[in-house]
Image (spheres, rainbow, N blue to C red):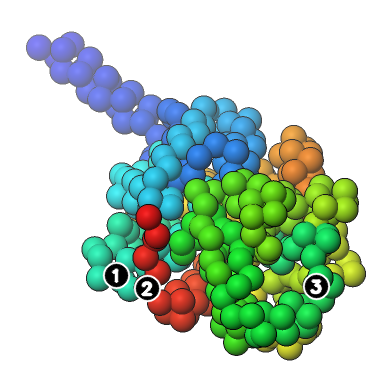
């Protein structure tokens, strides 16, 4: 009788000793990274090199899952409602703050609440830039505004969709300038840029990366940026703030999130990993190739940035008001 009891006791002690605490073993299986937009966009272009670097650091697969739909709401809601164990994370853009406000405006049940998501790290924060065809008559924002005031609703601009990041940037500018522009929404930033290059619209708010080659080729002219300071890639281009539009500031940023409630040891592992990602040579090289500067913020600083940005976005959505998509 004694031998079985001793054996059982030893087995229990062995199992107890072999069972590490929750934070120490994470991750012990693959992590899913939700990207709530189609492949090829800003979130995907940032998320994939982040996932690749995380794999190298954590020694576990980080699988990118593109769950697009409803302007990003489908994927964001999936991440917000995922089990908070650290095995589901998400790379999202600044539109994460816009969708809940737009839902409120229309009296819809929000797809998710921002409180359901916890920031891990910010990786990029590119201000949008205002571009027009190089052969357009406007060489400055002043000329653009003066013409728009003479011809209300005649100057058309494209965007990645109603209440999308590119729409909100232009809406903020138009409101501050007291002008009426004609909004032509498309299904994404790529088609919106194609419409500008094809002469179907006359202006576009865009992240710097996609339009820089066309600016260098002489096809597009950039009038201003929505940043707090001038872009290194466009040192001669003024910011809207410099031009007197104090509240016109907008960034297409990409950050990493987890469902709220992830245990602190696991969250620390994710945060520490994100801090190592931005030092990873392959990640740095990829972002340089995309002409996207890395702007890293750890969770506490990122949270403050996100809160301030979300406030600007909420105000912008309210100013724009209800916008029904034209069929």
| Residue closer to the observer: 64 or 196 | 196
Check contact, mark 1 vs mark 2: CB within 8 A: yes
Q: Earlier in the sequence, mark 3 or mark 1?
A: 1
- Image position, residue 248 (x, y; %): 64, 79
Q: Quadrant of residue 85?
A: top left
| Residue closer to the observer: 101 or 84 | 101
Q: Could one spot residue 308 in this view of the protein?
A: no
Q: Which residue is mark 1?
A: 106
- Image position, residue 231 (x, y; %): 81, 65
- Image position, residue 98 (x, y; %): 45, 66
Q: Could one spot residue 38 in this view of the protein?
A: yes
SS at badge 1: loop
- Residue at 51% of width from left, 57% of height from top? 185
Check contact, mark 3 vs mark 1: CB within 8 A: no
Above or below, 97 relative to 64: below
Q: Quadrant of residue 104?
A: bottom left
| Residue closer to the observer: 217 or 17 | 217
Q: Earlier in the sequence, mark 2 or mark 3?
A: 3
Viewport quadrant of the C terminus: bottom left
Q: Which residue is mark 3?
A: 138
Check contact, mark 2 vs mark 3: CB within 8 A: no
Q: Residue furthest left?
A: 1
Above or below, 313 relative to 64: below
- Residue at 59% of width from left, 46% of height from top? 191
- Residue at 61% of width from left, 64% of height from top? 157
Above or below, 178 relative to 158: below
| Residue closer to the observer: 291 or 86 | 291
SS at badge 3: loop
Q: Which residue is mark 2?
A: 322
Looking at the rendered image, the disc whose residue lies closer to the viewer, 2 or 3, is 3
In whole angstroms, how far apart are the C-alphas of marks 1 and 2? 7 Å
């Amino acid at each position: 009788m004694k031998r079985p009891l001793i054996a059982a006791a030893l087995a229990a002690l062995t199992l107890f000793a072999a069972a590490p605490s929750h934070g120490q073993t994470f991750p012990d299986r693959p992590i899913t990274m939700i990207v709530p937009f189609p492949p090829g966009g800003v979130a995907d272009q940032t998320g994939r090199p982040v996932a690749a670097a995380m794999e190298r650091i954590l020694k576990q697969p980080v699988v990118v899952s593109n769950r697009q739909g409803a302007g990003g709401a489908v994927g964001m809601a999936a991440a917000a409602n995922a089990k908070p164990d650290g095995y589901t994370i998400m790379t999202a853009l600044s539109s994460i703050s816009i969708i809940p406000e737009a839902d409120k405006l229309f009296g819809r049940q929000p797809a998710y609440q921002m409180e359901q998501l916890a920031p891990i790290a910010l990786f990029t924060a590119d201000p949008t830039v205002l571009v027009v065809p190089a052969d357009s008559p406007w060489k400055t924002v002043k000329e653009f505004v003066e013409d728009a005031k003479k011809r209300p609703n005649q100057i058309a601009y494209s965007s990645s969709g109603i209440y999308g990041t590119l729409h909100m940037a232009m809406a903020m500018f138009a409101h501050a300038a007291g002008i009426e522009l004609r909004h032509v929404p498309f299904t994404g930033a790529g088609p919106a840029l194609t419409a500008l290059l094809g002469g179907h619209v006359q202006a576009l708010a865009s992240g710097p990366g996609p339009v820089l080659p066309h600016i260098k080729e002489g096809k597009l002219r950039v009038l201003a940026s929505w940043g707090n300071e001038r872009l290194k890639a466009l040192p001669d281009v003024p910011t809207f703030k410099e031009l007197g539009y104090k509240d016109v500031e907008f960034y297409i940023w990409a950050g990493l999130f987890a469902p709220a409630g992830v245990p602190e040891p696991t969250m620390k592992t994710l945060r520490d990993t994100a801090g190592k990602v931005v030092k990873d040579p392959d990640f740095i090289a990829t972002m340089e190739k995309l002409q996207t500067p890395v702007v890293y913020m750890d969770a506490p600083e990122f949270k403050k940035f996100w809160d301030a940005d979300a406030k600007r976005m909420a105000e912008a959505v309210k100013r724009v008001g209800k916008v029904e998509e034209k069929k």
